Image: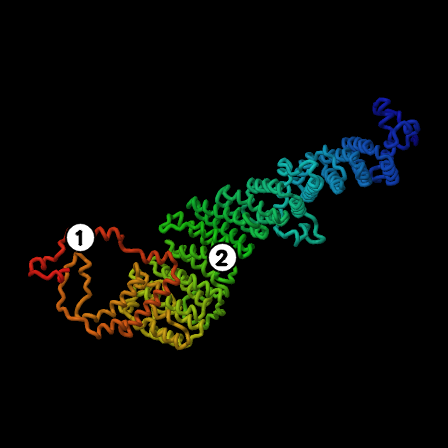
Amino acid sequence: MSFVKCCFEGGEGQDFLDSFVQKCTDPGCCCGCCSALRPRYKRLVDNIFPASPQDGLVKSNMEKLTFYSLSSPEKLDRIGEYLFQKASRDIYRRRHGFVIIAMEAMDQLLVACHSQTLNLFVESFLKMVQKLLESTDPQLQILATQSFVRFANIEEDTPSYHRRYDFFVSKFSAMCHSNHGEPGPRDRIRLAGIQGLQGVIRKTVSDDLVENIWEAQHMDKIVPSLLYNMQSAEKYETVSCAEGGGAGGEEGEEESPPRLAEACLRDLLARASFGHIRSVLRPVLTHFDRHDLWIPTDFAVHVFKIIMFSIQAQYSYSVVEALMQQLEAGRGGVRAARAAVLAAIVGIAAGDSVGPSVLEIINNILTNLRASVARGAEKETEEKLYQEALINALGEFADHLPDYQKIDIMMFIVNKVPGAAKPSRADAMLQHILLKSLLKVGATYKTTELSKAFPAAFLEALLRLSSATEPSTRVLLQRILHTLLDRRDNVPRLAVVTLDYDAAGLSVEKCSRQDLIFISKHGYAIFSALYEGLQLESNSTENIACIYTTIALLCVELAADDTLCDLMLLILAIQQSSISNPVLSVSQQCQLQAVSISLAALLPHVAKLPRLADYIHKVVEARREECGHLLPPLQHEYRLSDPTLLPAKVPYLMMDQMAISECLKASGVECGRLQGAAPYCGGGPLQHRHSWIETGAAAGRDSLADIAAGTEPDSAASSPTLARQAPAECAGVSLEALRRAAEGGSGAERRDAAQRRRALNLAFRTAPFHHLMQVTQPKYEIQEKLEEIFRSVSEEPLLAPSLKSGPPLPDLCLY
């Protein structure tokens, strides 16, 4: 066996030049002339390869090559090209051991290069990486990916603008979708693909002058690849960036494709500017639509929360907007799922939404609700789920806003509610849906002062809906009032009509001056709306119970001497209406009686009035003995076999206004207003036009009634159609009658007149102007009445027939 060989021995048929220049790579060659003729960089590169690939890279020779490359940086491109050629031949010959050595040498040279000379070497390096990625061996693909990631972590001072990464994006994305038969190699290939994409992102997004990675052709490959790996996770646990510091999992836990894909997606989103957010969202939405990933919603919520937590806070609105634009697309179930995802993430965006963006989000949600109602009952169940999800989204969004913005939102919603007196079915449904939305927002508001919770325009709009056609809509309205009125969590304790308030454990505090001012301005409107709400024929037991809770909350929240009389007037008016209102059923009459006695028992409990409490207790005991159906609890149906047990037949079991006044006086409460007629019930001073004039005139007529005993005030002269009757006698006016007229009548008459004046004064001080206009409208037009009078004058003779045929009378008697 010969230990010396020559490079010119061409056993394989190559020509002389090929043997001389290329094949002479063996250090043991006997021809010194061959080594001398080859360039030094090639000799140095050849020397790093061992005789056997198992021996690995020759480190001493590698150090020489590194020193040479640093000393002569202009040779870097040739060194890289030569290494690439050698590796290409070894890949073709399947000598993978030498390929790994060549790649290791490339990596060491890459790290050793200065940033100024890096571009000279990078092109050969990337060609080497691409060559390895094109192979079918998973080991070489993973090796190439690891080398690319090392390259991506190197910061370059002067990026190369002609460098392209299209191949790497496509190849790494394909690796992310690896379907290798064995789980172990499959996971390693997918991990390598995700790491490669992470390297591409890190290398390109930092400089806008490099290839634009945000273009659709790249995002359509990167984003679906990451989502494909994330959806294979066994469970989804979303944490904010601040809490989790990424998605790497717990320390020491093995990296998995879903976790690494999530970390890569977070990294991509964290680097996105405002203009690039939609570039990421578009492929996300497309991926979910194509692969039906909206249902169930767990994965969709997980992904969108990651997006919201990863982007800059001021860009959150764009994510919500993009998702809302997709709400109406697809079938009903998908719409409901998208709305559920929106409800899960909209609260994250609320904290950074200001100004027009807040109302724009609210308006978009309301627009989608209106569109859902307009679709009718295509698939009623799916539409209800969709509507509920949108309402939840509205509530979640409002929950994270400051209180002043919540009031604006509630006013915005209530102005969208259709207010037709007889709404169509679609309008009635829209009323119901919007009030549910309003209730959801109201539940997030914490009331401090009633004047802030109920601005005048907002309160007026709410009270206008208290007479809505649908009973369910009126129930929603009362629940909205409960939410905004209740500041001490008393609603659960007042949800059921009862007399046992000691066991309820109500939380009562002193009424503030601001609330007293508020109720003095708006109390009449509120009480009138509640009273009228109880008079509707379509009321169910739930309607009456809800109004009871509202009035009870007002009693608890506004318990003060200044409000006691007004509240008691309302309670007495409710009691009277159960007797006088002909449209109420027997059940409704009994329910109103139970409500009035319960509220009357609540007032002395919260205001600490023992005398009044004793009186109410006596009334309760009397009713319990004879008419237990006039006491709580409310029943859905009352079957009275004896008509004498109706409320109208037992007036002696009713609460007496004068007795209550005496009880309040004994407790030191000024009850002057309580002695007047209640302005809420029929027959009061606000029932017809010019009642304030007629009230005063009535007192004058009463006091002048004694001027001529046995005679009537003569008004026939002013009515042409009436025959004037001659007086029975022409007696003169007595001095006593004149004295009584001057004194203004008896004491009882004066008290009655004073009582009417107080009631009139109270009504005109507290009633809204539009209400005064309605109740004082004339029953006829003046022009029509005048025409009737003139027509009667032309048709009838001036003198009565009896006077024409009788004896002549003096002119003074005729006129």
- Position of 74 compared to 610: left or right? right
**In the rendered view of the protein, which quadrant contains the N terminus?**
top right
Which numbered tag is attached to residue 95? Answer: none
Other-residue count near label 1 (Cα within 10 Å), few / some / many at <14 / 14–19 / ≥20 = some
Q: CA distance from mark 2 to mark 1?
A: 62 Å
Which numbered tag is attached to residue 442? Answer: 2
- Position of 395 compared to 251: left or right? left
Q: Which residue is mark 1?
A: 792
Q: Is residue 74 above or below residue 610?
A: above
Of residues 191 and 514, the one drawn nearer to the viewer in this rendering: 514
Residue at 43% across, 62% down? 521
Residue 544 appearing in the image:
no
Question: SS for tag 2?
Answer: helix
**In the rendered view of the protein, which quadrant contains the C terminus?**
bottom left
Residue at 39% across, 59% down? 768
Residue 198: percent from the left, percent from the top? 69, 42
